[in-house]
Image (spheres, rainbow, N blue to C red):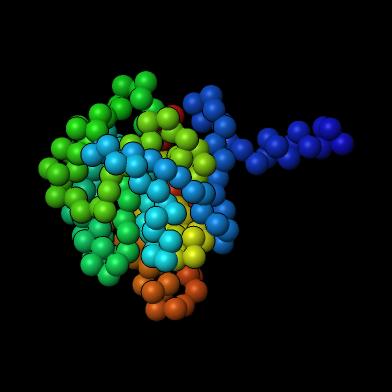
Amino acid sequence: MRRHLFTIALTAMTLVGGGAVFGATTGAPAPGFTITDTGGKPVRLADYRGKYVVLEWTNPECPFVRKHYTSGNMQALQKEWGAKGVVWLAVNSTNAGHSEFKTPGEMREWMRAQGAAPAATLLDSTSETGRAYGARTTPQMFVIDPAGTLLYQGAIDDKRSADPADVKTARNHVRAALTEALAGKPVTVASTTPYGCSVKY
């Protein structure tokens, strides 16, 4: 029995950078969190109960992230859905001890230079929230409904490349999930395999 339980425990986790990363489950309540934004304000997921929320895992050093910012794709999504009442939160879970870590000022300036428009940019410098969601890559996307249920998680689209030109012909999974959800329809594709750079835990 003990051996069986150990096998289950190993199956339920993925080791990244020496730490256990537990994943959120599509169709289940999204893990709650309180993270400080780049202005020093604590942001709680619970504050947005009653609204759709998008979580965008990001890292300015990642070429896959830059693909979606240099093409203007990520900013367009942030603005499009923000105008429809969706709360868009960008999350950087790069550990404070990693060489790619950005200070609040550096992260704020990078987002400003991109013309980004999330409701807030959050610095998960302990990586606690990234681990709770099982965020593996940047970018990686999560869509949460007004009841706090995780509707979608995975890749931003179906073009697994760092080429900005691929954005034009890609199926955007986030746009598709939000379009269906806001129309009162079930999300057709609720989970995909994310692609990009590893989260720097």
Residue 16 horizontal side relative to residue 175, left or right: right
Say which residue appears at 55% left-offset and 57% top-offset: 29
Q: Nearest the camera: 142 or 103?
A: 103
Residue 1 horizontal side relative to residue 125, left or right: right
Q: Is residue 2 visible in this depiction of the protein?
A: yes
Relative to 118, is 108 above or below?
above
In this rendering, the count of numbered labels is 0
Image quarter of the N terminus: top right
Say which residue appears at 28% left-offset and 44% top-offset: 121
Residue 119 location in percent, x, y?
26, 53
Residue 59 horizontal side relative to residue 46, left or right: left
Say which residue appears at 51% left-offset and 54% top-offset: 30
Residue 40 placement: quadrant: top left
Residue 122 location in percent, x, y?
32, 42
Residue 100 location in percent, x, y?
30, 27
Say which residue appears at 49% left-offset and 48% top-offset: 32
Q: Nearest the camera: 192 or 174?
A: 174
Q: Is residue 164 visible in this depiction of the protein?
A: no
Relative to 49, is 128 above or below?
above
Residue 123 location in percent, x, y?
33, 37
